[in-house]
Image (tube, grey):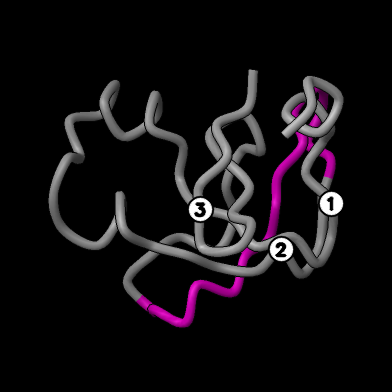
Amino acid sequence: MTWAERTSPIKVGDQVAYSKAFCQSTGQLTGDTPHARGKVVELQPLGQTMLAVIDWGNPGLPTKVNVKNLSVVRNGQVIERD
């Protein structure tokens, strides 16, 4: 994994997970959130923030998430972004 790949923005179609830093900062170390995997179906700007609309396949998780709180999943492995 190159630096460019780790720092590239989240795109529509990417498989994503909540980032390790987000889960730790919110105290969500167990349960659905740290193990959730989903697909980005849309990106929506909200002022200076970019929200990803995600199909988690789990109705208990929020569908809109700040892209800064996400990591890309490739080949089943979570790639933490720099």
| Label 1 close to label 2 by CB (< 8 Å) | yes
Query: Left or right of 53: which side holds 12?
Result: right
* In this view, 21 is above or below 37: above
Residue in the foreground of this view, choosing between 26 and 79: 79
Which-is-in-front pick, marks 1 and 3?
3
Identify residue for label 1: 11
**In the picture, which quadrant includes the N terminus?**
top right
Q: What residue range appears in magenta?
A: 45-59
For label 1, the SS is loop
Crowding near pointer 1: few (<14 within 10 Å), some, many (20+)?
A: some
**Left or right, 71 with reference to 48:** left
Which mark sits nearer the N-terminus, 3 or 2?
Answer: 2
Magenta part mainly helix, strand or loop? strand
Q: Residue at x 59, y 54 (%)?
A: 73
| Marks 1/2: CA–CA distance | 7 Å
| Residue positioned 71% across, 63% down in the render | 40
Find disc 2 in the rendering and name its residue. 40
Q: Is residue 60 above or below residue 6?
A: below
Distance, label 3 to label 2, CA atoms, is: 16 Å
